[in-house]
Image (cartoon, rainbow, N blue to C red):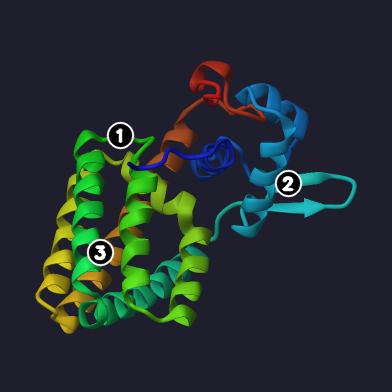
Amino acid sequence: MTKRRTRTEELTDRLAEAILKGELPAGARLDEHSIAQRYGVSRTPVREALKQLAGLDLIDMRPHRGAVVAGVQAVHMGELFEALGEAEAVCARLAAAKMSVIERERLDEIHARCAEALAAGDQDLIPGANRAFHEAIYAGAHNAFLSDTVLVLRRKLAPFTTAQFRLTERPPESAREHLAVIRAIRARDGEAAEAAMRRHLQSVGRAWAQWSAEAAEAARQAPQAAALPAPEADQAIAR
């Protein structure tokens, strides 16, 4: 069963999305108490979410000012997606050669659950299901150093890879791309698996750029945003 996100993960994604949309502009101060009240959580997940956002370079932690929105640099994001794509492509190639029969069967099961979440457009389940699919391939590469490296990259990009699924066409596209990777791994075709995974991550990067541009344009046309999105804009995080 696919696990739902923790409060910290969901809050991190909510705040990251607000930054990406321009609802929280560069220079805006993020107050722990206000965020906790706004999203209906304690200050503990707020602190953890702010730490994660700082690790994503979306906010700066400044003395005497606390957390301040840093904004997003397109060039920086492009380089991160490129690095993730190359690292995951190598994982897919190695997995095609090294995965055991049991690991391949397990990957098929994970893919089936991920495909169900994508087909349903379930925004709560998609991030975890998608992560499980990719992490099964990292594990199947049987290279601990490579796996550790790609996990760091994926965690750094997590809010951005999640944002792509806001595009209506993206979930079914992602499911088809996953299937291409799966088929190559089943056939033990390392070159095809590597190429399919690289194409998949290139699509992810393009989808994120499209979503980001559309969100920024919508923010420019909307009335000036407050320090946090208006209460009616979304709901409190489920307890």
Image disc number at residue 68: 2
Instruction: Identify the mark nearer the N-term, 3 or 2.
Output: 2
Name the kind of residue labelled 1 in the image: Asp
Instruction: Determine which quarter of the picture holds residue 215.
Output: top left
Instruction: Identify the mark nearer the N-term, 1 or 2.
Output: 2
Q: Secondary structure at mark 3?
A: helix
Residue in the foreground of this view, choosing between 86 and 48: 48
Residue in the picture at 25% in, 75% down: 99
Residue in the picture at 14% in, 79% down: 188
Image disc number at residue 122: 1
Separation of residues labelled 1 and 2 (CA atoms): 31 Å
Please provide percent x and percent y for residue 186: 12, 71
Separation of residues labelled 3 and 2 (CA atoms): 33 Å
- Relative horizontal placement of residue 110, taking residue 127 as reference (left or right): left
- Relative horizontal placement of residue 106, taking residue 10 as reference (left or right): left
Q: Can you say whether 137 is above or below 167 in the image?
A: below
Name the kind of residue labelled 3 in the image: His
Q: Residue furthest top?
A: 232
Image disc number at residue 200: 3
- Relative horizontal placement of residue 176, taking residue 77 as reference (left or right): left
Label 1 Cα crowd, 10 Å radius (few <14 / some 14-19 / many 20+):
few
Name the quarter where the N terminus is drawn: top left
Image disc number at residue 9: none
